[in-house]
Image: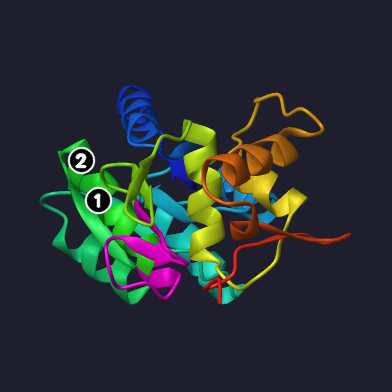
Amino acid sequence: MRILLVEDDKLLGDGVQAGLGQAGFIVDWVRDGIAGELALKTGEYAGVVLDLGLPRLSGLDLLERLRRGGNKVPVLILTARDRVEDRVKGLDGGADDYVLKPFDLPELAARLRALVRRASGEAAPRLQVAGVELDPASRRVSFRGRDIELSLREFALLQELMLNAGRVLSREQLAQRLYSWGEEIESNAIEVHVHHLRRKLAPELVRTVRGVGYLMPRDLS
């Protein structure tokens, strides 16, 4: 899952980007509110981790603009322990959750996974589609009871397809969600990952919609 981190503290930002990366997230990081607004206009994200005390445009103002523009991306606020009023304003302003500073990275990752699940209409912590079970927390995958070993990118692709089961995702949408800024993307990268998923799981689990993209059926009946 691709996440946008909007945080001006370099030490904290470095730690969050590295920690969420180890938890399987793809993290783009910007350091002010204007840059965050631009990133959200030009990129596609599963969630946003938003600090409130940002230069150029505050986190609360960015959140207000985001919601006023109709963007429903899940937003998790980072806030200081002694700023109760900020938490209230953030939640009332359209944020979905908050984490108090200082925080543990595993908790931040778990809260992000929960936000993305809810935004996708999934309540259960594990995704189950067409005989495939995927656990985002442990990053384990099984198909019809058999454990499947996937690369980081294959796992991310499968997770996106499962979260959007029954809907077609274009190659461009998948590339946006699987790669962060600055990463080189081969022209056939998505096709290669799809080929590997079909080989490791089952060919019929990822269907090609010619000229449009790929779809994972809700069931194989």
What amino acid type is highlighted by mark number 2? Pro
Quadrant assignment for the C terminus: bottom right
Residue beneath the point at 60% across and 41% down? 199
Residue beneath the point at 35% across and 47% down? 146
Name the image colouring: rainbow
The circle on residue 188 is none
Is 90 above or below relative to 33? Answer: below
Q: What is the CA distance from the residue labelled 2 to the residue labelled 1? A: 6 Å
Residue annotated with mark 2: 106
Number of callouts: 2
In the image, residue 122 lies in the stretch drawn in magenta: yes
The quadrant in which residue 138 appears is top left
In the image, residue 41 lies in the stretch drawn in magenta: no
Q: Left of 98 or right of it: where is 164?
A: right
Residue annotated with mark 1: 110
Q: Position of residue 64 (x, y in %)?
A: 48, 68
Q: Marks 2 and 1: CB-CB under 8 Å?
A: yes
Is 36 above or below relative to 169? Answer: above
Residue ranking furthest to the right: 211
Q: Position of residue 85 (x, y in %)?
A: 19, 65
Viewer-closest of 104 and 155? 155
* Residue span colored magenta: 118-134
